[in-house]
Image (spheres, helix red, strand yellow):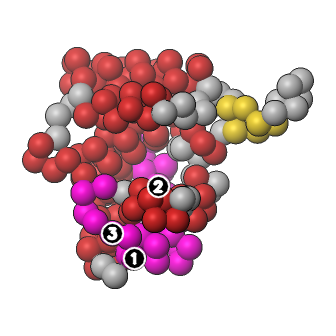
Amino acid sequence: MHPIQHLRTVMRHRHMVLRHCIKAGIPVQGLLHDLSKFSPAEFIPGALYFQGSRSPNEAERELNGYSKAWLHHKGRNKHHFEYWIDINMESKRYEPVPMPTRYLIEMFCDRVAASKVYRGAEYKDGDPLAYYLKGIERGRPIHPKTAKRLHFLLKMLAEQGEDATFRYIRRMKK
């Protein structure tokens, strides 16, 4: 069990997301970002499965076949596209719905911060895009409009860097 290391990682991530959210023009979302990680349902598994180089949810999922902490987290945090799944009244199936722009922006900030925390000194602006593309290959349920917008931002980050991307996001937000 690694509660101190896990707490440090969560705090580093939250501070980085806050900085990115300020750059993006959504400071309140940055302040409120990932508060559920301090709940027992998420913090205890995070400490138990902590590795430092990737999300503890991945280790919990490998061991148990699912992650209770992730199920708790995605159901409470609107910056995850998995939160935005509901029953389509026509098809009677669970399907992704488009994310509102403010949560899409927070998701972008979250992904960049997570890549920086886990990649450390090896981080490159193309890392968040590479991680996203790996997830899409696995068939993650994201609405096509949300996927297109997120891909655009991640590609802009990879090609033009943070300054240009955050300038664009501040304009997009309006």
Is residue 40 shown in magenta? Answer: yes
Q: Mark 1 points at which residue?
A: 48
Residue at 21 percent of width and 31 percent of height: 125
Q: In this view, does 114 lie above or below 9?
A: above
Please report the bounds of the magenta region as a residue range: 25-54
Is residue 147 left or right of 9 when viewed as pictured? right
**On the image, numbered disc 3 is attached to which residue?**
50
Please name the residue shown 28% across and 25% down the image: 157
Q: Label 3's element? A: loop
Q: Is mark 2 on a helix, strand or loop?
A: loop
* Disc nearest the viewer among 1 and 2: 1
Question: What residue is disc 2 on?
Answer: 33
Secondary structure at numbered mark 1? helix
Q: Is the N terminus in the top left, top right, bottom left or bottom right quadrant?
A: bottom left
Q: Position of residue 44 (x, y in %)?
A: 46, 77
Q: Is residue 155 visible?
A: yes
* Distance in Å between CA atoms under marks 2 and 3: 20 Å
Looking at the rendered structure, the kind of residue marked 3 is: Phe
Q: Quadrant of residue 110?
A: top left
Residue 73, above or below 45: above
Q: Which amino acid does label 1 sit on?
A: Leu
